[in-house]
Amino acid sequence: MSVIADITFLRPFWFAAIPVLATLMIWRYRRSGQPGDWQASIQPHLLAAMTAMGRIEPAGSRFFAAVPFVIAMFVTVALTGPSIEKRGAQTFRNLDGVVFVIDVSGSMVRDESWPSVVNMAHAGLSALGSKPAALIVYGGDSYLASPLTADHRQLAQSISLIDEDFMPDQGNRPQLALERAADVLQNASVLSGDVILLTDGEGLNDDAIAAAMRITELGARLSVVLAKTTVSGNSPISPATFESLVSVGGGQIYETTDLVRFMEDIGDAATSRTELQDLQLVLRADIGRYLLFLALLPALLLFRRSRA
């Protein structure tokens, strides 16, 4: 009885066909009151003679008129998708995530190095496998351009569409973007993730380091892809600034020429963390196909041998 109680129908709307089949079966059963409905066309004494000679099946064949409808009912119940819970199944579920944080201020987008930044983001997406990714862009403010999604192709297209008119706010405040990245990881209950900051270093300060500390507290790590821009009139960013940021974030520093190493690191992290998950999904096994074998039993009656 417990097994029956655990059955769930995946496509219950097919049950609507059963009353229709039952009505048709009753109607056909009543019309089969005489052998082959010959009584409407043959005189009674000729009908009796042909029945005695075995040329017409007797009226006792009413039962066989219902066989096709019984078969159809078995098929209909199979189509409703009766299912039982599949216990102990080996399943994989990825609760990691990668958040790409891209500086889209004027010093980045208008620089000749911008295509290489876009190329690094595309390469990182291609190495993620099934791991979901999110996109945050920032300038004077930060925006969640895409929540965590496994549709990496669409995310790559969104990055390709970024131009110098993309960001409405002037300025450069990476700390806001890093705080938003931490919010994305926390709201999605990500077990272990990565934040990839693609920047030329403008605006990095103690507030950005504090945001990096929050990211590490959530079990994630922060890495930086350094874009060496040429249009910025400001003084070069000290390497110590980047080192302090990734030291707190627990990640790596990549230049736009470190394409292979960047892809390998992201790919290795995606594989290992997926294998370490010990989670199981609730799966249901559709047993409707087995009811089709039961439908074959009454179908055998349709192949009975006729009497000579």
Image: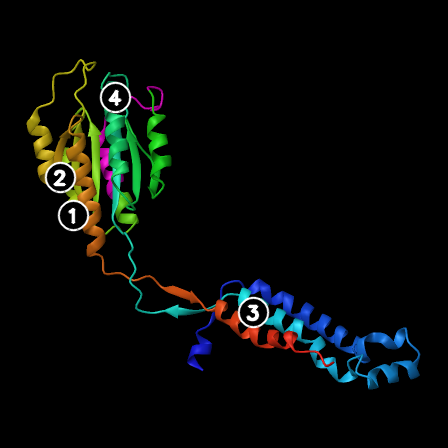
| Mark before the other along the chain sequence, 3 or 4 | 3
User: Residue 24 at what x, y percent from top left?
Assistant: 72, 70
Q: Is residue 281 above or below residue 191?
A: below
Disc 4 versus disc 2: distance between alpha carbons? 22 Å
Disc 2 versus disc 3: distance between alpha carbons? 56 Å
| Mark before the other along the chain sequence, 2 or 3 | 3
Disc 3 versus disc 1: distance between alpha carbons? 52 Å
Q: Which mark is residue 77?
A: 3
Q: Secondary structure at mark 3?
A: helix
Residues shaded magenta? 164-182
Q: Secondary structure at mark 4?
A: helix
Q: Which mark is residue 169?
A: none
Q: Where is mark 4, residue-wise?
A: 114
Residue type at tag 1: Glu
Which one is nearer the viewer's eye here, 52 or 134? 52
Q: Residues within 10 Å of mark 1 (few under 14, many from 20)?
A: few
